[in-house]
Amino acid sequence: MIDLSPDPSVVELQDRVRDFVRDVAIPAEAALDGGHRQADDDLRRRLQTQAQEAGLLSPTAPTAYGGLGLDHVSQAVVLREAGYGLLGPLALNCAAPDEGNILLLDRVADAAQRERYLAPLARGEVRSCFAMTEPSPGAGSDPSMLRTVARRDGDEWVIDGRKWFITGADGAAFAICMAVTPAHDGTPEGATMFLVDADNPGLRLERHVGSLDIGFVGGHGELVFDGCRVGADAVLGEVGRGFAYAQVRLAPARLTHCMRWLGLAERAHDLLLDRVAERTAFGRPLAELGMAQQMIADNEIDIAAADGLITRAAWLLDRGERASAESSIAKTFVAEAVNRIIDRAIQLHGALGVSDDLPLALFSREVRGFRIYDGASEVHRMSIANRAVRRRAARTQ
Ligand SMILES: Cc1cc2nc3c(=O)[nH]c(=O)nc-3n(C[C@H](O)[C@H](O)[C@H](O)COP(=O)(O)OP(=O)(O)OC[C@H]3O[C@@H](n4cnc5c(N)ncnc54)[C@H](O)[C@@H]3O)c2cc1C
């Protein structure tokens, strides 16, 4: 039997995160004005200072850089707890996109890049963004449609292209930009990641893309790389290995999203449970009405299944496996489950559910995008189906 119960030190940390979310992160949601005001850097700095004082900052970052260095299974416990507050992950410096960028830099960056980019990011001193997606006809679901190009010019690289929906771009200290690098000096054409400082004169934030959600600091930006010159030291890892590094970031980062959003869905479910016990209709509490009970039970089932899928994928990652298939299944299920859970909570609150008097409408707007980013559900289903067909074919040959 596999014992998946968390280490006592993780349970103790979970308790402290729960208290912090209750006492600090949830009250701070008032600053979002029911979803009418964007989370900003002042709010982030204030919350992160409090998390630092509580010894809770950067649970996923390496201990060498002041983080708590949690493994993936422990992250599943702690990030889920943090996610119970919409601003909990931001406060703890384990929100997207910085959390995924910390992991990527830790795995791929050289010593100088670690000091320059990873160290301040892990300490919460700066923010970052990850610039992959492009407006049509560029790369979205299909990364092979990448159009941003980086050409060699002497010792430098010159990047040209346009990226959009880049979370946190406004106010980020640097971007990790994915670009095509044409064949050069015996290196074949491929995709390469570049570290581009925000004050590079060849990089500009063209606009904010308005969207349903308001919880990501810096919102989502459209970035233009226009003759953007960077030195050879801006290459993250090796030239031409960008897609391989994207895979390094992908499975763990999509899983931490699942953990955080599951926490938020549980908050919605708790609100639902309070509501059905207190509100009566047709002479009985909602909790005793059959169709309401079905919604309560379906939420319980979704939460339990999401937890199981996340834990299984996290456990495989901790064993050093890529967990591509497992994290893909987990991501697809959890992204849809958290939307269902929050929607049922809204439904059983009636008009109150869609009002600004409760945070449920805000939560539903925040989680909707998760069915699109980190791989749209349809793209994951394509991969899951392809894997299944290949597995069966291999067994029957
Ligand atoms: C809130 C949010 C934050 C984001 N943050 C970032 C970020 O920080 N950095 C970044 O680089 N990108 C970011 N993105 C962009 C995200 O990665 C892309 O939206 C995603 O990869 C899909 O690409 P696309 O929007 O171009 O959709 P398209 O590629 O145009 O796809 C549109 C739709 O087509 C359908 N589809 C696609 N492929 C298939 C298929 N094989 N079978 C059936 N249907 C299919 C899906 O329903 C898909 O949603 C973010 C997006 C959102 C919503």
Image: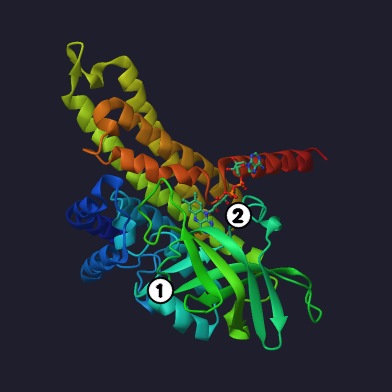
* Count of numbered marks: 2
Colour mode? rainbow
Image height of 73 relative to 352, above or below: below
Q: Nearer the viewer, residue 288 or 280?
A: 280
As shown in the figure, which amino acid type bears the numbered disc 2?
Pro
Looking at this view, name the residue that lies furthest to the front: 206
**Can residue 236 be seen?**
no
Residue type for callout 1: Leu
Would you name the residue on which mark 1 appears?
Answer: 121
* Comparing labels 2 and 1, the label whose residue is closer to the camera: 2
Give the residue drawn at x 31%, y 62%. Answer: 40
Residue 204 seen in the figure:
yes
The answer to whether mark 2 is within 8 Å of ligand 1 is yes
State the image coordinates of residue 271 (x, y, percent, origin top left): 24, 36
Task: Please name the residue shown 57% across and 45% down the image.
Answer: 376
Residue extending farthest bottom? 155
Judging from the image, what secondary structure is the residue with disc 1 in? Answer: helix
Name the residue tied to disc 2.
135
